[in-house]
Amino acid sequence: MEIVIGLLIIAVGAFCQSSCYVPINKIKKWSWESYWLIQGVFAWLIFPFLGALLAVPEGHGLCELFSTASSFNVWMTVFFGVLWGVGGLTFGLSMRYLGVALGQSIALGTCAGLGTIMGPVLLNIFFPEQDPLSKLTFAVIMGVVVTLVGIAIIGVAGSMKASSLSEEEKKAAVKDFNFPKGIAIALLAGFMSGCFNVGLEFGKDIHFADTADMFKTLPATLLVTLGGFVTNAVYCLYQNNKNKTWGDYKKGKVWGNNLLFCALAGALWYSQFFGLSLGKGFLTSSETLTTLAFCILMALNVVFSNVWGIILKEWKGCSNKTITVLVIGIIVLIISSFLPQLL
């Protein structure tokens, strides 16, 4: 029963993350770089900080935790957060050129597979005595493979969509639709985004001894998102300067509206990793599912992003055959979340 609860919590987090781009559509009169920076303050600083506080027992503090933890692990966690930040930047671009459904599917699918595999592989380089490669069991590898198969099927559906619609229909669904450019960016985004889980692996021991299992990864999550915020902030400020969009921040009449929807988008985005931490606390009886939790989260993100894609009519005008392939891909991804437990 605890495993079911853990998976449901992760699913709720995935649904929230897949919904985080909906509030962004309500932001007014700000350029991409301006609203991306402000929502990042909420998504990568404020909410992760509040979440990390839940992992701090009474009488202790985060500064105490980070100062007493292994400095190597702390800095490696932040470093992979910086690399993940590159994935975050290109992640947004993948949806610009492919739409919410297909963009998230390709990027998150790549992220799911590589993020799960890279963590133990890189840890084995630095800490071979811990034998982290032992986590990559047959069940884990099969879970990753089935997830990638599901992503590939959805990618086929996207390719069918690109070839079957006229340029006018593509632009109606996704304004800047560009399949070749979008695929390249989405694959890069997925590769770099996989560094998030690598950061969590390096930071897995950064917690107090008496912290509850469900909160143990939240301090590491804060360190990863802190690194990612640095990357995104530098790029956004550069774009503000390049595009001369500093004036966005002076538009006082839209600040109330934009701040609200940036905060909502940030909260929804952070919910995925808050849910991941809580969910893993219920999966401790299964090392396979604990290892695969990140992959499961990304797979469910893809499922819900495609649901939103259907709601937002990004697949409007596609043939029944294309929709059938899309649905098959979604079903395979759902199966991938539960298959490892059956092996």
Image (cartoon, rainbow, N blue to C red):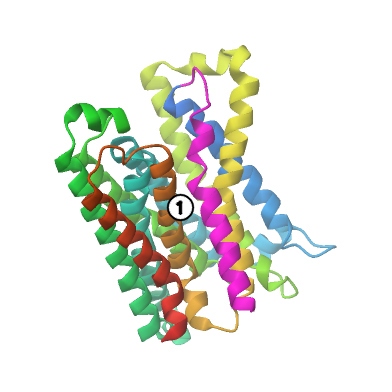
> What percent of the width, then of the height, locates residue 165?
18, 36
Indicate yes or no whether the magenta region holds residue 223. Answer: no
Q: Quadrant of the N terminus?
A: bottom right
Residue at 37% over, 37% down? 313
Name the magenta segment's main secondary structure.
helix
Please name the residue that numbered disc 1 is placed on.
304
Residue in front for this viewpoint, 178 or 70: 178
> What percent of the width, then of the height, locates residue 199?
48, 62
> To which quarter of the image does residue 209 belong?
bottom right
Q: Quadrant of the C terminus?
A: bottom left
Identify residue type, mark 1: Phe
Residues in magenta? 1-30
> What percent of the width, then of the height, locates residue 258?
58, 25
- Pointer 1 local density, CA inside 10 Å: few below 14, some 14–19, many at least 20: many
Residue in front for this viewpoint, 299 or 316: 316
> What percent of the width, then of the height, locates residue 304?
45, 52
Left or right: where 111 falls relative to 58: left
- With respect to residue 301, does 258 lie above or below? above
Residue at 48% over, 36% down? 233
Indicate yes or no whether the magenta region holds residue 18. Answer: yes
> To which quarter of the image does residue 220 belong?
bottom right
